[in-house]
Image (cartoon, grey):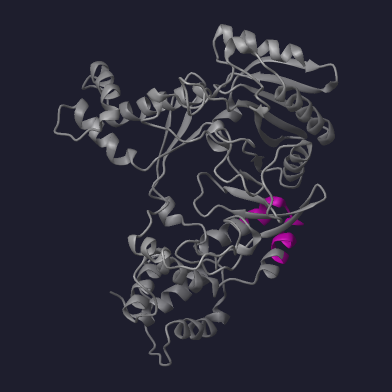
Amino acid sequence: MNTLYGLIERLIQLSIENKLITSRDAIYMRNRLLDAFCETDYEQTAPCETDLYETLDQLAHIAIQKELIEDTLAQRDIFTSSLMNLFLPVPSLVENHFWSLYQDTPQKATEYFYNLSRMSNYVKVNRIAKNILFKTPSAYGPLDITINLSKPEKDPKDIAKQKNMKSTNYPTCLLCIENEGYAGTSTHPDRANHRTIDLHLNHRDWRLQYSPYLYYNEHCILLSSKHEPMSLTENSFYNLLSFVEQFPHYFIGSNADLPIVGGSILAHEHYQGGCYEFPMHSARVMDTFTLDKYPNITCQLLNWPLSTISISGQNLDEVAKCTNYIYEKWKTYSDPEVNILASTEDVRHNTITPVARKQGNAFVMDIVLRNNRTSEEHPLGIFHPHSDVQHIKKENIGLIEVMGLAVLPARLKDELEEVKAFILDQPNAIEDYHLEWAKELKVHYNSTIDINTYIHNAVGQKFTRVLEDAGVFKMTSEGISHFKQFINSL
C-alpha cells in the first residue's frame, strides 16, 4: 500500500494534468487534503505511480484504517467524492466558464463540462469500463448491446444501516437540483463533486448535467429546475427542439409519459441526450410523404422495429406543431385488428417516445408510437418484451433502447458463459430459463464459428425480437399496411 503523502501528491499531480487546478494551487490543495485526513504534519514524498481511480481507492482505504469512515461502498464513495470536490470550482464559476466557451462554439462548452465531470470522478469512468459492449447485425442494421456492469450492487452493511436511518425528503429525488454538492448517505448517492449548468429553454429553467453511469458518449440529462412529474405536451416538443437549437451537435429525447413504456423516473421531468449516433438514426427510409396541414415538413416512415415517423423541417415552430399534431391524433387512435386500443375504461394507452436532433439547418423529430396496454396473455404489456425473450430482457423499453442500444442486466455476464459451455459440451450450470434457447443454439452451432461472436449475435437476435415486440405496427406486410392506415388518418 502506498503512503498517504505519496497518494496526496499523486492526486494533486493528476488534477494538474487533468486541468482541474494549476501548479499554483498545489500547496493549498495539499493542506486541504491533509486536513481531510486529520493530519497536521507532512513529509515531502514523491507521487505514487497510480491512476486516478487507484489513488482514490487507496486514499479511501487509509481513511477506513484511520477510522474516519466506515468500510462500506457508500462511505467510500462519499469520502472520495468529497476529496474530488476540493479540486472543483463552485457552480457559478463552472457555469461562467461554460458560457464563455459557448461563445466560441457549443462543442467547446460541452467538451469542457464533460471532461470536468469525468476528471472529477463524478462520471464513474472506471466502473463504466467494466460494461460489456458489442455490436450485432439485424434486419434493421447494426444494433448496440451493453451488459451493464457499472452500477455496483448494494453493500450489505449499507442496507443494514438504512433500517436505522431517519427518513428525509431532501433532496426530493435523484434528479432534483438540490443534489448539486450534496454529500450523500447510504440511501442517496454521493453528489459532492456534482455540477450542473443552468439553462433557459422555452421560457423555463432547466439544468444540464451528465449521467454518472453513462451508456454512450456524453450521455447528458436535461432536468427541470422544479420537481414535477414527467408529461408529454406540445411544450415538451418545444423544449427538445429548443435544446438542439442551442446544442446542435447533441440529440435529445424524452421517455414516454406512461408506465410500462415510460422511463424509470417519471416523478421528475427530464430528458436524455448526448453526442452519439444511435442505430435508429441510420435506419432505412421505407416511405416519404407530406401532410396537408404541414406542407413544409418532410415525413418519413423508417424501417425500424418500433413504429417510427421521422419528420424534418427548417422551422422549429412548424416541427413542434407537426409533432404535436401527430401525437394528439395517435392518442385517440385505435386499430383493434392489431391490438391497438387508445384507451380502456378512460385509461389512456397511446403515447410516443420523441427524439430531436439537427441535420444541417433542419430540425428532425423522430416520433416513436407506443402503447402500454396489457392482456391476459401478456400481463406485462402487449407491446413489451414477450415471455420467450424475457430471459434476456424483461425490463421496460425506454428511450435508449428504443433507439437501438440494449441495456441488459449484469446477470448475463456469467449466464452467457454457462450457455457457451452448454453449447460446447463442457461442464456448466446453465439457468433453466436459458435452456430452451441454448438447445436451439447448439443445434445450429458448428466448431468453425467463433463461440463469442455466435453468442453475441444470438443475443442481438433476441434484442431485435425485444424491439419488435415493443413495436405497435409490426414490420410485416400486414403491419405496414395498418401503419399506413394511421398515416392516412392524418
Looking at this view, name the residue that lies furthest to the front.
Answer: 345
> Looking at the picture, how far across and down is residue 226, in whole percent?
71, 55
Q: Is residue 22 magenta?
A: no
Q: Which residues are magenta?
A: 96-111
Residue nearer the viewer, 61 or 383: 383
Q: Is residue 431 above or below residue 461?
A: below
Residue under the image location 24 percent in, 16 percent down: 443
Q: Based on the picture, tell me whether residue 110 belongs to the magenta stretch.
A: yes
Q: Nearer the viewer, residue 455 or 277?
A: 455
Number of marks in picture:
0
Magenta region, main secondary structure? helix
Vertical placement of 467 versus 203: above or below?
Answer: above
Q: Residue at x 47, y 85 (%)?
A: 35
Residue 391: x percent and y percent?
36, 30
User: 306 or 30, which is in the foreground?
Assistant: 306
Residues 144 and 337: in front is: 337
Q: Quadrant of residue 198?
A: bottom right
- Compared with residue 253, is residue 165 higher up or lower down, i.e. above or below? below
